[in-house]
Image: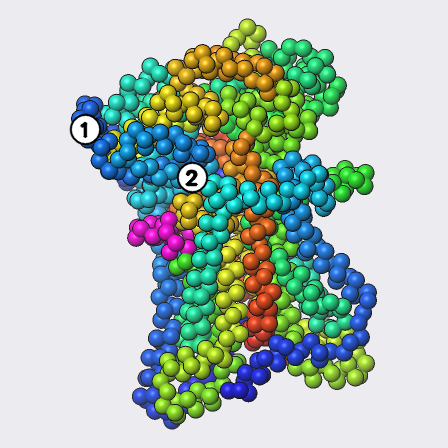
Amino acid sequence: MTVSAGPVPRRSAGATAARRQNRAAYALVLPFIIVFAAMLIVPLAYSAYLSFFRTQLVGGEQFAWLANYLRAFTDPSFLGGLGRMAIFLVIQVPIMLGLALFFALALDSGRIRGSKALRLLFFVPYAVPGVVATLMWGYIYGPDYGPIAQVVRAMGLAAPNLLSSHSILGSMMNIVTWEYVGYNMIIMYAALRAIPQERYEAAEIDGAGQFRIAWSIKIPAIRSAIMLTVIFSIIGTFQLFNEPSLLHTAAPNSVGDDFTPNFYAYNVAFVNQDVNYAGALAFLLGIVIAVISYFVQTAQNRRQGEKR
Amino acid sequence: MLKATKRATALAASVVVTALTLAGCSSSDNGGSPVPSSSKAGQAEIDKAMNTPTTLTFWTWVSDIDDEVKLFEQKYPQIKVNVENVGQGPDQYQKLRTALKSGNGAPDLAQIEYQHIPSFTITKSLLNLTPYGAGDLKSNYPEWIWNQVSQDGSVYAVPQDSGPMGHLYRSDIMKKAGITSPPKTWDEYAADAKIVKEKTGSYIGDIASNEPVGMVGLLWQAGAQPFGFDGNKTVTIDVNSAEAKKVYSYWQNLIQQDLVSTDPDFNDQWYQGFSNDKYAGWVTAAWGPLFLQGTVKDTAGKWAAAPLPQWNAGDNVSGNWGGSTNAVLSTTKNPIAAYELAKFINTDPASTKLLNTQQNLFPAMNSVLNEASFTDATSDFFGGQKINELFAQISPTVNTKFQWLPFMDYAYSEFNNTVGNAMTNKGDLSAAADQWQDKLVGYAKQQGFTAQQ
Amino acid sequence: MTETLTRTERKATSVPQRRDSRRSNLLSILLWLCALYFVLPLVWLLIASTKDNSDLFSTFGFWFGRGFSLWDNLVSVFTVRDGQFARWGLNTIIYAGVSAIGASLLATMAGYAFAKYKFPGATAMFSVILGAIMIPLTALALPTYLIFNSIHLTNTMWAIIVPSLVSPFGVYLMRVYAADSVPDSLLEAARMDGAGELRIFWQVGIRLLSPGIVTVFLFSLVATWNNYFLPLIMLNSSDLYPLTVGLAQEQSASAAGGGAQALFSTVITGSFISVVPLVIAFLFLQRYWQSGLATGSVKG
């Protein structure tokens, strides 16, 4: 996601021109920066400030140094949520992105009948609000009247309880996969479309199969697009909120209020009314996301470096 | 995991101690919300307030309560009431707390369940209604209800409805199993559970694993005192007492023998359980009958109601599950009008009648509970039984001294994480209750309370 | 300028013919089977919205029930609680529309500036903006709420619209897009003609950036349309709810309220209706957002 710096304005334009351009640049950037600062930086700073305090029902508010942060390191709810998300990251993200890549390559290969329609069908779930998706899947999973259970029972088997505490993580992975495969596919597909055809025409003439072309030409060519989807998926995973919060209602014992770190931070803030600790949790979560994203990116860059 | 919690608790506790020493007596205004004057608001003041154009905001999740509010607006045309539904129970409390915390945006009055009143009095968020004449209402209510809304002479809410507990069952399924009279004791209930399961395949009932309030109601019946709060700095936490463990191990036994189910309640699947005969009964509260009537119409006429089974034969005690109040927030600028609205909705005869017949609420007031037109009503859904009369008789048998913690939201969410989990997994409920106890004590200490166990 | 325009256009439209037409039946069948996975839940939703409460729970999910209640459900959707659903729909359109226009405008201006000017602080600002994508927004909710409440903005439309104006990803996308599709030579030529910088942006930049703008617009539209969390905490009056919060609340009211409140089939039908507009928007604007994304991800 590193972006090359913009082109340098021609020096010959002179100092006044440069100043004029700077003014224009600031005028263009300023509206966004103002809203950005007000909506992200200020709450963030406020949250940071709050995270150094402790508020008690009895005794009020005191400065607490890093106590909230230290508490998070031994908080089984927070750590448990992180662990769950780590599993999510290791299992769901590769499946989702693998499917997305497969679909994108298949559609791009030009060998699919009705590829235009397919592209849309894959993408449609992204346009479905998370609230609706979870509600809908909640019904579909229903162990008594849900269609999955109905089909399984019709085959004479015992219907699985997809909302039990053992399977809920998998069920949630499925919902997220359903929602976002299409989205990721579109990003990859769009990148594939932008590859100049000449790059692999030669390979095709040489008789290279589609798989070979995909593997050694197409995938490397859209590496940055894939990286983008990876980073977005990491961020999305650790920020899971809608799904657990709505499944919490459908299956209260399977989805605890600490199921994902983000949902936990929300509950700490709004149910336990502990803004201070919630602020600390949010920061730690942000740091975890940043660190993982950073490592994934550097690992990828290094691999890319070795290959060259 | 326990070890980690303990460490966190110890750490938190040490910080608390330091903090308390540092804070010293800086927070000395523990006297309760400011009271305008020690004497009651005079009639002249009330008349003036009720004839001044005023807009009140009222947060409630009771659906279509606008009808009762309209009656009030007809009586006091100068007062306009905005009824807002910001969510059911906990959802509303969250919003209320955040609004209170930030100092504006809170309504004038709000729907608050009995069990959550201390959670709001601890933050001095509820207006003491005694100066506005609420003390006069005392004689209208059963003792246990009045105890729920008052503390040391202060009254913090006007009771709206109540939920004395009873046992609803499907007489047809029971009959099929050869059981002709409802269980009088919990021992009989357990024996019947076995027969019902063997003969009909139905569970005698569902003891929902996500329903701390129902379970606490059963603890209440058993004479346990799991919670206590002195209104100041001391809480009593005793969710794993001997009385409580008697209740847990009773249900654990039934759960492990697969004689009762533990499905989460009030979701679509649970509703289905009633219409497809999965459950042959429901240990519930007085609002249950009307609730069922609207939900599983196709089982009409097959139901019957009885008092809760007893721990000792011949006893007659019950607990309470649910019920709520209208409380005035201390941030209101119109305390008199807000109190009058709360009083009107919950005591005016036309309004209380509507509350019962349209909103399916089981009354709290004696006058309604004892009214002939209420008690004599028969229910076709319950095969012609006089349901109201039965629950009206149960109401005075509710244990009178039951208290709550000033942080029930937390207590309930931890119940789900501990005891509720054990119920789902058919595990050891008593051990889970010990965990629940630890969590609650830890939280109380961390919040600066003195916790008695 | 015409040259650049066609260049972008070609990317979007001319590609389908460029590959050979050796179709693979096996792969086609496989993909169409996969498509079932994405479509079946929505088919279920459509079928479920033709059922009444009791059919919903007692008949097979993928076939119609004993009665056909779509019409009744639709009537119920729009009449329950004095027809609040229509109100929620209107709110959603306002929130999503205004936010998406605002967000794409702000992102376009900023992205263009980052791409086309080198000015002091640009790199620092851009890194901060990119870093902001990492912040779990839900965790900022409470502080944001407290700040908004102190300036009396909670429970107003602004509480939803203003935070939705910020789209760091939009800025990133527009920067990449602007770098790619607005040639410096064109800007220089315009400068030679004596046009002011802002006029160049409005007259030259915006036109060249339009596919990118549509992309950012669409994604902001979806983000706000589907947002559940922000309105959940910011709004109290149900008159201000968007569809997501309204539906979720109706669902939980039917679960908890029982009796006359059992609106399960109404909620399902309402959910179905709430999905339709976005699907249509994506269908019709397909060409734009695909080309917009292409550049964004390639250069990323």
- Give the letter of the chain under mark 1: B
User: Magenta span has A59?
Assistant: no
Residue found 46% across the figure and 15% down from its top: B374
- In the displayed structure, A26 sits above or below B93; it is below
- Residue B362 appears in the figure: yes
Q: Measuring from the top left, give residue A123's x and y in whole percent.
A: 63, 62
Marker disc for residue B45: 1
Residue found 74% across the figure and 73% down from its top: A110
Secondary structure that dominates the magenta span: helix
Label 1 neighbour load within 10 Å: few <14, some 14-19, many 20+: few
- Residue B144 appears in the figure: no
Amino acid of disc 2 = Asn
Q: In which quarter of the image is residue A149?
A: top right
Name the image quarter holding the C terminus of chain A.
Answer: bottom right
Label 2 neighbour load within 10 Å: few <14, some 14-19, many 20+: many
- Local secondary structure at mark 2: loop
A288 sits left or right of B94 in the view: right
- In the displayed structure, C178 sits above or below B36; it is below
Q: Quadrant of residue A39?
A: bottom left
Marker disc for residue B85: 2
Q: Measuring from the top left, give residue B412's x and y in whole percent.
A: 49, 33
Q: Measuring from the top left, give residue B18's x and y in whole percent.
A: 33, 40
Amino acid of disc 1 = Glu
The part of the chain drawn in magenta is C137-160
C85 sits left or right of A184 in the view: left
Residue found 75% across the figure and 62% down from its top: C31
B25 sits left or right of C26 in the view: left
Tell me which numbered mark, 1 or 2, is placed earlier along the sequence: 1
